[in-house]
Image (cartoon, rainbow, N blue to C red):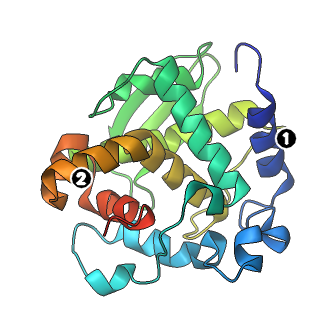
């Protein structure tokens, strides 16, 4: 990435570099786990299934998600949220919906092209060519799903640029930790917590929130649950 990397961002990429991609690199030292609260790494399979389940709502499916204050989130998740806030600030975005043009900030030296293809195993994928990045989106996805997928894949680009050795996805696996981080980055970019709290106080309706922020209803419900709003 162009420009000087802050200490906290270097810390984030260092953690990701040191892990195997399947589990949180700090799993054995997680303060959240040690306090007896829910560790996100321990429920990543359930979270992945929720995000893959479409817009069908089952209130019981969210019961395992505990509201967590920022300081109760694992360190890696705190840093991912900080990264999302940095990109929003750098892009001058101050209200929803977040424009997809923001993905250009993932790597200023190489443009990003977006192509729609009949993907079967993924909602999206990235390729690094000699002079550009390519994000592939699954053909037939909704606008809200595509927006979420774009920022999910943007995190993978950022990780590719920020880690040594180069960050790699490890096949078609639900529930890998790096995929969970990419989902969380997309949620934090598209649904900044202060915006969500403000808008929820106004509308109190998941469907309306999804339209305001331009995201799938599932993402709204996950963020509201995490923030203790539902």
Q: Quadrant of residue 14?
A: top right
- Residue 137 in view (yes/no): no
Instruction: Name the residue rendered at 56%, 26% in the picture.
Output: 106
Q: Is residue 210 above or below residue 195?
A: below
Q: Name the side, left or right, on which 120 lies relative to 139.
A: right
Question: Is any part of residue 157 visible from this angle?
Answer: yes
Describe residue 13's horizontal placement relative to residue 129 as left or right. right
Identity of the residue drawn at 39% across and 43% down: 194
Mark 2 nearby-residue class (10 Å; few <14, some 14–19, many ≥20): some
Residue 152 in the image, given as x and y percentages of width and height: 48, 46
* Residue 217 rendering spot, x and y as whole percentages: 24, 60
Q: Which residue is mark 1?
A: 165
In space, the residues marked 2 and 1 are separated at their CA atoms by: 41 Å
User: Which element type, helix, strand or loop, lies under badge 2?
Assistant: helix
**Position above or below: 198 against 65:** above
* Residue at 53%, 37% in the rendered image: 84
> Residue drawn 72% across and 13% down?
3
Of marks 2 and 1, which one's residue comes earlier in the chain? 1
The N terminus, quarter of image: top right
Q: Position of residue 191 (x, y in %)?
A: 37, 45
Residue at which label 2 appears: 200
């Amino acid at each position: 990435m162009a420009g000087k990397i802050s200490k906290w961002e270097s810390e984030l990429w260092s953690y990701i570099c040191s892990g195997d991609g399947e589990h949180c690199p700090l799993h054995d030292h997680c303060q959240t786990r040690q306090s007896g609260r829910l560790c996100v790494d321990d429920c990543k399979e359930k979270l992945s299934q929720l995000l893959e389940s479409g817009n069908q709502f089952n209130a019981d499916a969210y019961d395992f998600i505990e509201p967590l204050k920022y300081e109760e989130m694992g360190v890696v998740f705190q840093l991912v949220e900080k990264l999302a806030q940095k990109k929003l600030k750098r892009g001058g975005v101050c209200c929803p919906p977040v424009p997809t043009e923001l993905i250009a900030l993932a790597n200023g030296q190489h443009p990003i092209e977006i192509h729609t293809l009949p993907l079967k195993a993924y909602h999206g994928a990235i390729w690094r060519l000699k002079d550009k990045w390519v994000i592939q989106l699954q053909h037939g996805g909704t606008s809200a799903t595509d927006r979420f997928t774009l920022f999910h894949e943007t995190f993978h680009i950022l990780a590719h640029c920020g880690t040594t050795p180069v960050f790699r996805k490890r096949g078609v696996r639900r529930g890998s930790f790096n995929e969970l981080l990419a989902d969380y980055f997309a949620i934090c970019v598209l649904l900044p917590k202060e915006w969500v709290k403000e808008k929820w106080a106004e509308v109190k309706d998941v469907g309306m929130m999804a339209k305001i922020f331009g995201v799938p209803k599932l993402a709204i419900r996950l963020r509201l649950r995490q923030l203790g709003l539902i």
